[in-house]
Image: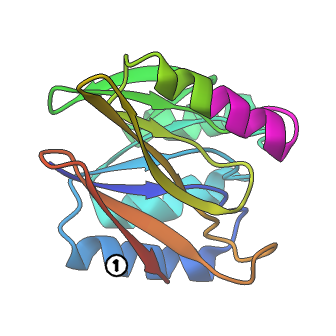
Amino acid sequence: MIIGVVADTHDNLNKVSKVIEVFKEKNIEIVLHAGDYIAPFTLKKFSELGVKLIGVFGNNDCEKPLLYKVASGLGYELYGQPVELVLDNRNILLLHGFGGKKFTRLFVDAAAATGEYDLVVYGHTHEKDCRVFKKNSRKTVILNPGEVCGLLSGRSTVAIVNLDTLEVEVVEV
């Protein structure tokens, strides 16, 4: 299964349109969103992709009841963070982040160190992060796709993950 991973869209509909183009080219089967949509119209824009979206709320998602209502109407799933998922027999932890960058990374690293997850996806820091954590014979991919909005880094990036191989491709949009 090929999944698309995004975070921190922050209502940048022009960039979301480019994300949709890239995900269509890559035949994405599902989208994981690590939070900070901001407004419901961003979720509606993702419906142009025609695949399911599973996401968590971020610290800037203030309209949670409305976001949840719109997501449910589109067949999407939105959760508080963190949420555990199983996709294509892979254990995934999806979260946005907590507090500052340092604490978020400590939390992500601690989750990966448990050996419970094949993939730990997060956002919040607006910085791309793709690492492999190995414990015994188990490996966990840690992934922050960076920010879609391009507000802090000046770059808009997303990730494509092959769940069969756990290979990650980060794409600038």
Which residue: 58% across, 43% down?
A: 122
Q: Nearer the viewer, residue 160 or 42?
A: 160
How many marks can you see? 1
Residue nearest the observer in this picture, 54 or 81: 81
Residue 99 counted in the magenta span: yes
Task: Identify the secondary structure beneath mark 1.
Answer: helix
Residue pointed to by mark 1: 22
Image quadrant in which you'd find residue 169: bottom left
Q: Amino acid at mark 1?
A: Val
- Coordinates of residue 65 in the picture (x, y in percent): 71, 28
Q: Is residue 60 visible?
A: no
Whether 157 is drawn above or below 59: the answer is: below
Q: What range is drawn magenta here?
A: 97-108
Relative to 86, is 158 on the left or the right? right
Other residues around mark 1 within 10 Å, as few (<14) / some (14–19) / many (≥20): some
Left or right position of 98 against 70: right
**Is residue 49 shown in magenta?**
no
- What residue do we see at 73% from left, 62% from top? 10
Q: Is residue 85 above or below residue 145?
A: above
Residue placed most toward the observer, 165 or 96: 165
Q: Position of residue 146 (x, y in %)?
A: 60, 64
Judged by its main secondary structure, the magenta piece is: helix
- Residue 125 image point, x, y percent: 74, 53
Side of 164 where 155 appears, left or right: right
State the residue at coordinates (41%, 43%): 74
Q: Is residue 144 visible?
A: yes
Residue 138 at x, y = what percent? 27, 26
